[in-house]
Image (cartoon, coloured by chain):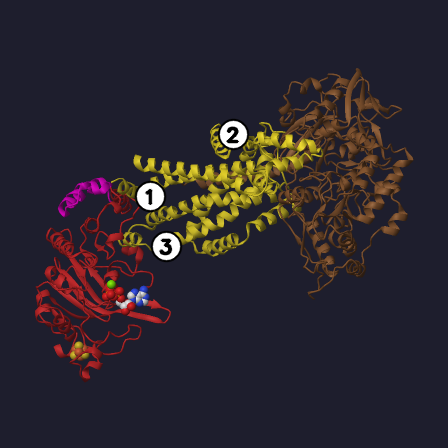
Chain colours: A yellow, B red, C brown
Amino acid sequence: MRRYFARKVAIYLLTFFVAVTLNWLIPRFMPGDPVLRMLTRTSVSNPDAIAPMREYYNNVFGLDVPLWRQYLNYWAELLQGNMGISVWLFPAPVTEVILDAVPYTLALLIPSILLSWYAGNKVGALAARRKWLDNTVLPLGYALTATPYMWIAIVLAWSLAIIAGVFPVAGGYSFDLQPSWSLVFFNSLIQHWFLPFLSLFLVAFGGWAIGMRNMIIYELEADYANYLEALGAPRRLIRRYAFRNALLPQLTGLALQLGVLVAGALVTEIVFGYPGLGRLILMAIQNQDFFLLQGAFLFIVIGVLIANFVIDIVYVLVDPRTRTGMTGGAA
Amino acid sequence: MSLRVDNLKVYYRTLRGDVKALDGATFTVADGEIMGLAGESGSGKSTLSKSLIRLDTRMRLVEGGVELDGKPLPIGDQDAMNAFRFKEVSLIPQYAMSALNPTRKIGKMISELLGARGVKYSEIKPELERRLDLVGLKREVLNNYPIELSGGMKQRMVLVLSTLLNPSLLIADEVTSALDVSTQRAVAETLVEFRDREFVKSMIVVTHDISLVYQIADTIMVMYAGKLAEKAPADVVVNAPRHPYTQLLISSLPEVGVRYADRKLAGIPGSPPGLLNPPAGCRFRDRCPLAFARCVEEPPFVEVDKNHHVACWKAQ
Amino acid sequence: MRTRPRYIAALFTAVLLATTACEGGDSGSSGNSSNGGQYPRNETLYTSGSAWGPPTTWNPIVPGYATGTVGLVYEPLFIFNPEKLELEPWLAEKGEWSADNKTYTVTLRDGVKWSDDKPLTADDVKYTVELGKIKAVPYSNLWNWLASVEATDQRTVKFTFSDPRVQEWENWLYENAIVPKHIWESRSEADITTHKNEKPVGSGPYVYQAHAQDRMVWKKKDGWWAEKALNLKVAPTYVVDIVNSSNEVALGLLTSGRLDLSNNFLPGVANLLKGDFKVKTYYAEPPYMLSANTAMLIPNTTKAPMNDVAFRKALAESIEVKKIVEGVYGNIVKASNPTGLLPVYDQYVDQATVSSSGFTFDTNKAKATLAAAGYKDTNGDGKVEDKAGKPISLKLIVPSGWTDWMEAARVIAEGAQAAGLNIVAEFPDAAALDDARTAGKFDLLLNNWTGVSNTPWTYYNYLFQMPVQAQQFSANFSRYQNQAAWELVQKLSRTPSSDPAYKTTIAELQKIQLTEMPAIPLWYNGMWAQYTESAWTNWPSEAAGAPKDFPSTWNNMWELGSIKMLTQLKPVSSK
Ligand SMILES: Nc1ncnc2c1ncn2[C@@H]1O[C@H](COP(=O)(O)OP(=O)(O)O)[C@@H](O)[C@H]1O
Ligand code: SF4
Ligand SMILES: [Mg+2]
């Protein structure tokens, strides 16, 4: 067990190292020059100022040392939580920009991922045994997963926010509020959060429900289920086993989904005018703000790695087969 | 009489009509009797053995009845049947390798199963451990997951579990087909031992390997195309079969008693009729070297000798 | 395990309750100004259209600061009145040129205070101007022609020029905000341009209240100097500028009455105005919007055939601007005068030159112009080849995602194709386009960096600025070199508007521009502004008696008088 985890941790560290290195490399091999960005932004009209300003911004962005040094500096700074300075939002530090945005994104992603997973699995499992549910959930689930996410988001925003006016159109909380520990503020947060959350929840939910339903039906046909039936075990026990076993591939799916959902958040945040990392990424791309982009990607990489690690651990706890694999690997 | 099966007809419902996979079986299995059930693939062995414990959703009880220890066995009623399963009738499935839930520790699964059947695990545990000892499994396997056991161990584990509540009838469906020869023999011997120790009263051992079943079975029943062909004490079936099909079956094997390969029952030319609309009369007619005019009528399964039943006009 | 679904149900009910509770809260809270952290609707102005990213800096020295940093908090010495085309004293009480135009003396108003209550003095002005000696400060070129700045007393600043560029100086005077020396002097040279300057201390009517990822909130401060000096009071207690996520979201906010002023480009706005959405614009009829800047087709004159004036002429003649104005914009913009001068400069347009040398859309004429200059279709592909017979294939680039410009570029390419010019539209990322423009690696592009200002000098400086560098950051993207024109531009810069030479110099420049076509003016981009009267009225409009200020929150519009819009607004409830 210990060895298994040591190996896992080593793999994750290696992945992290490679991701960071790639992350560092990408902007340096992409067209576009952050210093030029800044010079354009400040509209230097004084020809004499161009050279000194180049030098100045090269220094600000740490581009005035040899590449290998830049790489080492990048690591050194990174380990202190420093990811450089944003070009687009100059002179804000990337770390700060990201940390300001992250709470919103996490507040959307984590509940929508986990709740859709939970609810999708529950409903999918129920659908596997109730005909009427199956007849409603299955087409609904297929419809939800087949609809482009953008559509769902726009339809929700348009119908519930703009036309019906039940939910706000944009913002992280009401534009007439200042953050405080009050019920009004909390209400406002929830209200603004709900539609973007719902849109993410719905798309993911459909997929999980269908997946679970099919997995359960498959599991109920499995040999162990037949054997238990032959020994007169009650349906309830067999279903419990089937549910649990069907959950395992769903867990793997969850790990895979995590990265995809971050991309989903990008569209959500734009359609619902919701603040967060997704919007930042889009703007960073449009503005060739590689430092911000680097930071955002790094954050996502870390997030996905952590999530996968957690799921790895959970997997080991729930699936004995991986554990034998571990001892097998250690032996 | 432990088991009495009377004119049992179980069909499969399909879109094209009923598949008459078990079309009127009448036989008995005595207390302490190990009956080998042989016949080529598709002859209805599994249908018969499943019928005795659990009809699957596509199977339909058409006619006939079953009695176990003098009480009727409600095989057509899933819920009523549940009370008998495991306790009165039990099964060692063909797929013993994958019969245990992979994500539960074996002990835990057994305890949950027993709990659900109203049996206290703690009370039965000493007996369980004794039987594990008997089949040569360490008691620790209860703390293992199925994947941690070898194929043979799993087979023995299922054997112990299926017989734990001392059922009257144990159905072992092709238990050995997936095992290597030495393990096959060991499992077969264990079956006999369980009968001898009265863990089970009687057994139906389904196989298409007569050579193996001959070593452990008291009687052998041969099926052909959903019908019973012949039932007799094992050495009678092997040495003096009366049904032309059995005769061909036996003669197509290498010398009995010696090690014979897994030839199955394939040496007879032609193939059995489809069971969707089987022809009237003797179903072996098309392949039977002795077939004659009368054979267009269906031969009854009658006792031609003591404990020797045959369904053939030539044998009467 | 079993009880978990109930938690979810509870959560859902909580959300529903919150929804209904807040609906009640919304209607109940308006008019209740005692409500804790809530900005009362009738005291709050909601704006959007200038910020596209979270507010992260309040440093007025480098562009990129939060909306309103300059304008609401930091103020210039003068503001520009585009209606009268003259500077209006703002922090300054007056400014005067010496008789020889070598020195300029600014007298500051009495009693102007920073928001930390320290007085704003001549030292602050001197300090701000001298910041330009730092190369990274955008106005560092000021010191190419300014010799010295001197605070002669608390309220008097004397500027001595080595080269008195009157027009450029006046431009500087209203475009740059004064910062408090007592706060800034402790900052290092590098800090001046990299400091975020949180909680800015300024002289303007608002102070920092709060900001979040998606908003910037300003709060009115007591005792703004203009209340006494000019009898001007900003009406909204709070200004909440909403960070744009998309124009669709802005439209949603606007039509649902949650946004008072949208400075977004809303493509279908003409329909909105006709429909019952209570949305208003400056003009009730097309073009609805004031003109903000001139959209120009920029040919890269360092490349053939763009280096040939006949080619540029023919290109200009091939473009059906009407199709852009109507088809692409639905009439919310106006076709440009051939001179490219904005409508506010109409008085300077030399109509004689325009009618003799101006261009109009005429495909046949374009073909004739090409033929006359030796561009013929020698290979019979329907497109002309260059004079040497080699095929011409040019790209017109506009930023991807700028849907109106993309459409316009297609119209331009179509027109050119019809005249036999093989031009296709392409849409790189905005930033990639920036790089191409700066480095001169393009054939043709659209640009509109020449907007309303105190003087057409900014426009001609944009067109003719020299010397042409390897990288052009702000002007002369055509890289057009004409020493005579450049000298005229410099002359214009030194000529006071009152001097008769001012108008004649402009006329001479027009002639060069129309005959040489360094860039092709196409249409005037609108100063997008749509407002609702759900909370505020008396918006700027053409209507008689209505304020005439620019209704815009875009950065650098405040000092063009938009700040005065805030003093004219009236809350609906007190109408
Ligand atoms: N689910 C089913 N549906 C239709 N026919 C079936 C089904 N299962 C088995 N059969 C048919 O029933 C007959 C008997 O099958 P089975 O009892 O499995 O034979 P055995 O066990 O002797 O190989 C075969 O002809 C087979 O094709
Ligand atoms: S009944 Fe006839 S056909 Fe059938 S086995 Fe006997 S002899 Fe052969
Ligand atoms: Mg079978």
Of mark 2 and mark 1, the one earlier in the sequence is 2
* Left or right of C385 in this view: A252: left
Q: Which residue is mark 1?
A: A319
B282 to the left or right of C48: left
The quadrant of the image that shows the C terminus of chain C is top right
Helix, strand or loop under label 2 = loop
Q: Give the residue pinned by disc 2.
A: A82
Q: Position of residue A110 (x, y in %)?
A: 49, 39
* C537 lies above or below B247: above
> Do marks 1 and 3 both belong to one polypeptide chain?
yes
Indicate whether B183 appears above or below A103: below
Residue nearer the viewer, B33 or C526: C526
Q: Position of residue C481 (x, y in %)?
A: 75, 43
Residue most extreme to the top: C153
Type of amino acid under label 3? Tyr
Range of the magenta residues?
B119-143
The tag earlier along the polypeptide, 2 or 3, is 2
Q: Is residue A298 magenta?
A: no
Which three-letter amino acid code belongs to the residue tagged 1?
Asp
Considering the whole magenta stretch, tell me its main secondary structure.
helix
